[in-house]
Image: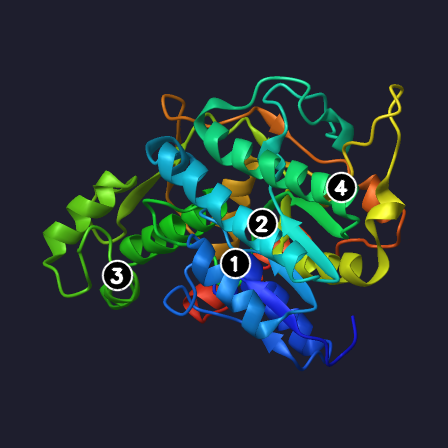
Amino acid sequence: MEKDAKIFVAGDRGLVGSAILKKLKDAGYTNLITRTRNELDLLDCIEVSHFFLKCKPDYVFIAAAKVGGIVANNKYRADFIYENLMIQTNIIHYSYLNKVKKLIFLGSTCIYPKNCKQPIKEEYLLTGSLEYTNEPYAIAKIAGIKMCESYNLQYATNFISVMPTNLYGPNDNYNLETSHVLPAIIRKIHLGRAIEMNDWETIREDLNKLPIEKITGKSPKQNILKTLSKYGIDLIEENDSNLVEIEIWGSGKPLREFLWSEDMAEACIFIMNEINFSDLIELSEEKQIRNCHLNIGTGKEISIKDLAYLTKELIGFKGKLAFNGDKPEGTLRKITDPTKLQKFGWHHKIEIAEGIQMMYKEYTGIDVLVQP
């Protein structure tokens, strides 16, 4: 990409898009195009058509998507498949019509089968059934991969699909109703420690910043405790040293791979600059072209139990962690094989313990209390 090229980052306010935008600015790109949801409704093909005709971007990153954790994915199934299909279809199609030089479509490793062979290689796509709770989201993302692949084959576009593993980092979602596992654990343990320390200033500051079911820092103490208990932050015994228990969804046994969002962003910029669709074509035994997407990951995993205890140690929480096996926990193991991308020269930089420290400081403004 030329430093003055027109680069459109769709979804620049989210975890993924904001990381890409930041890294583009850090790298000296000067002609960056962004739009808020009020300025451009990506679900509306007419608005998207007019945007591309007017702005004529040279390069496009599709980081816009409807995302959420297990509860949100399972509860809002229609919203997840409809909105993601519409967003990506509109952007990919009008990128083609307006001769965009190159496009990066960001998906997720949830595209792979629930009982997939581990570590997960790109060629395992569509070899088995998907995990039920996020099936609509996964199907939408698979459609995006196939749309990019099909446009490349029919129209000679240069649209590349990338599948990042579980992301975390700046601008993450800490809403306990919709968040992914790591920000949920961080916020729960942060609030749990504040309760055990009788630090109501911290609790009220947190709830003023991000209310839970309309409960804010101005709400009565008992209302706050009742609501926090509903989300698995329980004051078990109240005395000079409060005993607090934090509920973690699932048994704690599932293994997950976590990637710092800014490492992901650097990978996307690297791919945009260094890798073309032609570099990814691998003919199957049937002489068919498929699975030209790229995994972006660390190739390292940690159990949810170990993740929770690591976060507990870093934040300095003294209370209990209770793992609720009756709650959904998704696939038992899901680790990517990032070899394909690594062969081109990209590797991640941030390990999980360092990432949690940076994430906690970004959310609270304070350093972790204990060094690992």
Residue identifier under label 3: 207
User: Which labelled disc corresponds to residue 154?
Assistant: 4
**Disc 2 target residue:** 167
Q: Earlier in the sequence, mark 2 or mark 4?
A: 4
**Distance in Å between CA atoms under marks 2 and 1:** 8 Å
The colouring scheme, among rainbow, by chain, secondary structure or one colour, is rainbow
Q: Earlier in the sequence, mark 3 or mark 2?
A: 2
Amino acid, disc 1:
Leu
Q: Nearer the viewer, mark 4 or mark 3?
A: 4
Circle 3/circle 1 CB separation < 8 Å: no
Query: Which quadrant of the view contains residue 348?
Result: bottom right
Q: Mark 3 to mark 2: distance in Å?
A: 24 Å
Q: Position of residue 29 (x, y in %)?
A: 70, 78
Please identify, in this view, whether the residue under mark 4 or under mark 1 is nearer the observer. Answer: 4
Q: Residues within 10 Å of mark 4 (few under 14, many from 20)?
A: few
Q: Position of residue 247 (x, y in %)?
A: 35, 36
Question: What distance separates the C-alpha of mark 3 from that of mark 1?
Answer: 21 Å
Q: Is residue 42 visible?
A: no
**Element class at badge 3:** helix
Give the camera-side residue of 91 and 161: 91
First in residue order: circle 4 vs circle 1: 1
In what element is the residue under mark 1? helix
State left or right for residue 22 relative to residue 227.
right
Q: Amino acid at mark 3?
A: Leu
Which callout, 3 or 1, points at the residue further toward the start of the chain? Answer: 1
Above or below: residue 53 compared with residue 181: below
Q: Residue at x 72, y 51 (%)?
A: 159
| Number of the front mark, 3 or 2 | 2
The reply to whether dot 2 and dot 1 touch (C-beta < 8 Å) is: yes
